[in-house]
């Protein structure tokens, strides 16, 4: 298959080119590659990489069986998301072990967009737990992490932890040798954050959310992330963060900022009553909340988040990279996806200048 004359996102800019696909891989990118489908007037992007998503289409990774995982993945693909990290949150330990095993099996099967696991919990304190159930939060417990990783078959790629917990620095130091550690759900001061980074953490989970606010005398984790060199996830649904702060954050982060959805099961569905981590969630319009009003993830796909970022005034090229190449780097998948380049999986999205999706390809096949 050859897609011709599209504006292709190549090395952080759009340029006219043809893209040849063979055996599910991008075989070549360049001018005049031969006869094929004329894509003049369309943009060709890498499929989006959402490293922090709990679910969509009525299901979540904590509870989904094989058929439900497949249904979720069809939903992601329709919305331009061709790679995800199955994000597991704080739950009873037996349930977490079962979910790790199911999602790890999907990763090993290799025929779905599930590329690994993001462990968001249970290693948080109660102060900034957000939508995590306080009953199942845990102190730092390397043995339980090892059990989860073993159950998953080594599929865990990103681990979130509160650096203020006892034993966190040793935990971060050990884990960061083999996977990415993200600071999360924490009342951490700037100094606490710096200790977490010094121990080996290289990422921040949903910047500004579930952490102390940025203050000019007490910058906290948010200030440490903006002024540092770590990667930072940002929920770009238009609810969690004001558009002016989105623009300012990405101006500061540059190529370190990532679009995440933090979506939950209700993403893609109508208003109503749903569940997240075993807790009741009410969805009304773009907001998903617990009974006490706490935001409970989002109901927005990463594609919508990327478009929101552009509408907030972030340059198109930066927004696209923040939803593709940067999260692929975070997950250690940069040689597999997140770019239109020879050798990468042919996970591609054709869209118009209005950013409406026209077609999605997953490993070279239209979906």
Image (cartoon, rainbow, N blue to C red):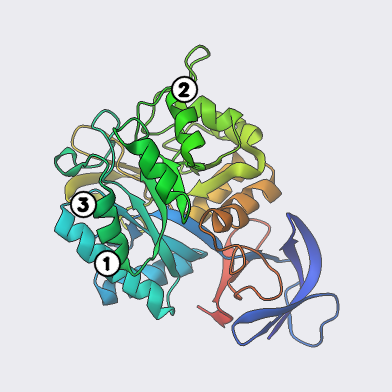
The image shows residue 282, relative to residue 37, as above or below, that is above
**What label sits on residue 275 in the rendered view?**
3
**Could you give the CA–CA distance between mark 1 and mark 3, rounded to whole angstroms?**
24 Å
Q: In the rendered image, is residue 286 in sight?
A: no
**Could you give the CA–CA distance between mark 2 and mark 3, rounded to whole angstroms?**
36 Å
Circle 1: element type: helix
- Left or right of 114 on screen, residue 132: left
Circle 2: element type: helix
The image shows residue 140, relative to residue 212, as above or below, that is below
**Residue at the location (34% across, 53% down)?**
119
Question: Is disc 1 surrounded by few (<14), some (14 to 19) or many (20+) residues within 10 Å?
Answer: many
Residue 77: image location, x then y, percent: 47, 69
**Residue at the location (58% across, 56% down)?**
329
Q: In terms of sequence position, does the residue under pointer 1 or pointer 2 come before the other?
A: 1
Residue 296: image location, x then y, percent: 29, 42
Residue 76: image location, x then y, percent: 43, 65
**Residue at the location (21% across, 65% down)?**
98
Residue placed furthest toward the top: 217
The residue singled out by tag 1 in the image is 151
Viewer-nearest residue: 95 or 46: 95
Viewer-nearest residue: 273 or 230: 230
Which image quadrant for residue 172?
top left
**Could you give the CA–CA distance between mark 1 and mark 2, rounded to whole angstroms?**
35 Å
- Left or right of 26 on screen, residue 199: left
The residue singled out by tag 2 in the image is 191
The image shows residue 263, relative to residue 168, as above or below, that is below
- Left or right of 38 on screen, residue 32: right
Image quadrant in which the N terminus is located:
bottom right
Mark in front: 2 vs 3: 2
């Amino acid at each position: 298959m050859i897609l011709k004359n599209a504006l292709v996102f190549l090395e952080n800019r759009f340029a006219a080119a043809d893209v040849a696909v063979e055996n599910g891989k991008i075989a070549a990118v360049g001018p005049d590659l031969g006869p094929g489908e004329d894509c003049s007037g369309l943009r060709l992007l890498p499929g989006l990489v959402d490293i922090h998503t709990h679910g969509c289409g009525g299901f979540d990774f904590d509870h989904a069986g094989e058929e439900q995982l497949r249904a979720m993945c069809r939903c992601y693909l329709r919305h331009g998301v061709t790679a995800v990290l199955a994000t597991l949150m704080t739950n009873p330990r037996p349930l977490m072990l079962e979910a790790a095993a199911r999602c790890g099996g999907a990763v090993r099967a290799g025929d779905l967009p599930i590329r690994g696991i993001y462990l968001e919990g249970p290693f948080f304190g109660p102060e900034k737990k957000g939508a995590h159930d306080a009953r199942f939060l845990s102190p730092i417990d390397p043995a339980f992490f090892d059990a989860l990783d073993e159950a998953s078959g080594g599929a865990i790629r990103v681990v979130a932890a509160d650096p203020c917990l006892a034993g966190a620095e040793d935990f971060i130091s050990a884990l960061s040798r083999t996977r990415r550690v993200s600071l999360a759900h924490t009342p951490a001061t700037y100094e606490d954050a710096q200790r977490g980074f010094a121990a080996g953490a290289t990422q921040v989970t949903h910047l500004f959310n579930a952490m102390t606010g940025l203050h000019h005398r007490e910058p906290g984790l948010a200030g440490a992330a903006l002024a540092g060199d770590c990667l930072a996830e940002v929920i770009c649904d238009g609810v969690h963060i004001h558009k002016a702060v989105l623009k300012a954050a990405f101006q500061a982060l540059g190529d370190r900022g990532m679009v995440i959805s933090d979506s939950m099961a209700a993403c893609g569905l109508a208003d109503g009553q749903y569940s997240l981590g075993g807790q009741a969630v009410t969805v009304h319009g773009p907001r998903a909340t617990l009974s006490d009003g706490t935001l409970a993830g989002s109901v927005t796909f990463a594609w919508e988040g990327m478009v929101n970022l552009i509408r907030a005034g972030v340059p198109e090229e930066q927004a696209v990279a923040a939803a593709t190449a940067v999260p692929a780097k975070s997950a250690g998948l940069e040689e597999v996806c997140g770019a239109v380049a020879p050798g990468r999986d042919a996970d591609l999205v054709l869209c118009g200048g209005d950013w409406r999706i026209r077609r999605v390809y997953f490993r070279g096949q239209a979906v």
